[in-house]
Image: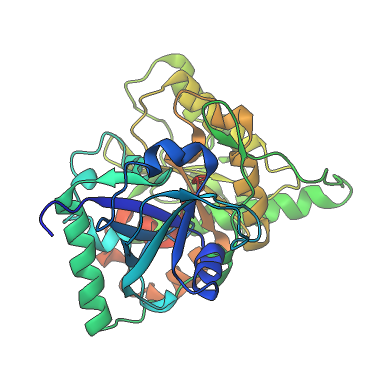
Amino acid sequence: MTNRNYWLDLFTGKTWLEFLKAGGKVSGFSENRWKTVQKVKPGDYLICYLTGVSRFIGVLEVISKPFKDTTKIWRDNLYPSRLKVQTVVALEFDNSIPVKKLKDKLSFFQNLKNPNAWTGRFRGSPSKWSKEDGLAVLNALLGAKKNPEKIPIDQKALLYRPKAIRGKKRSYTLPQKKEKLDDKGETKAVIRDHLKMQHLLYEIARNMGLDVWVAKNDHGRKIGKKKFGEFPGIRKKLTLHLDPATLGTIELIDILWLEKNAVLAAFEIEHTTSIYSGLLRMSDLIAIQPNINIPLYIVAPDNRRDKVIDEIGRPTFSSLNTPLAEICRFISFERLKDMFERHSEVIQAFKPLEFLDIVSETCELEDT
């Protein structure tokens, strides 16, 4: 069908399972997408993408005109703007294709102003894709169906996404409950765990041949008998051509990976109950430098993952000209540690940003 159009269709792991359980015959979208849904025609293809884990899972062919229906299919939302579909190709979760595997074949990965800017193409659905990009994904999925490759998937990331509340321009999260802050006995443990994470990021960077900047106020902290600022490869001063406000903010970020005088990546570590100080620092940086071209990462224990993503989705961070979630990704401390331990002997073979792509996940609130 030469005049076929390709459209993105976003799912979470949960809504994909609910779609299949209902027979896999109807795909739905939110009420405010109705105008766009009406542009989808029978014969068009829907490219099914799993949010949270950033993978392609299947392609559906549209076999009806758009219609509205409130028959319950999905538990958390109605998605009343609907299309009848039939499956062209569908993969198992562990065989689904990470989007980064296709970055050389997809147009929106080319000439990025920010390394994470591609995520903007996955913020809402349906959205129309070029035929070239649609065919690239379709062919990759058909190939994976014929010759499946098992790529283990993070089940927690697959099945959880925070519930988004739709604002006038963007979606936000609101805290579900107020956490009780316990300062007693927390300080020493938090500092110790914070330093462990910083030191791990330092070790990985050094194994890749990079220099490291440690937050100015952490240079004097001790790891063993040695001050952090005295470790090999730790820069004593940042020589970046930035205005004083930006430089002052960057100097307080927990870890920077440096190659010569370029910042390759910036990391904030969140281990406290409130999960806020690092996010505010990232937010300040974006407010001062809206066009900043540094990949940003929040690193936290896995049991704080949901809280981090909830907080990043709050109006404070989502209302920035460039929402924090668009350029900031989450890294689980446990996953980072596991990757380093399993690949320590060959870690130098990884390109830094490719390594970070593997261990990080999006914090964006997609309109699924």
Foreground of the two, 149 or 2: 2
Q: Residue at x 44, y 23 (%)?
A: 247
Q: How many marks?
A: 0
Q: Quadrant of the N terminus?
A: bottom left
Instruction: Determine the residue located farthest toward the left in the rendered image.
Output: 2
Foreground of the two, 244 or 325: 325
Is 21 left or right of 243, judged from the image as shown?
right
Is 74 left or right of 92, judged from the image as shown?
right
* Render colour scheme: rainbow
Residue 212: image x %, image y %?
41, 45
Residue 57 shows in this picture: no
Above-or-below relation of 199 to 323: below
Residue 95: image x %, image y %?
36, 77
Above-or-below relation of 172 to 92: above
Q: Residue at x 18, y 60 (%)?
A: 136
Foreground of the two, 61 or 322: 61
Q: Residue at x 63, y 61 (%)?
A: 72
Foreground of the two, 199 or 116: 116
Q: Give the image quarter of residue 46.
A: bottom left
Residue 261: image x %, image y %?
28, 34
Residue 281 shows in this picture: yes
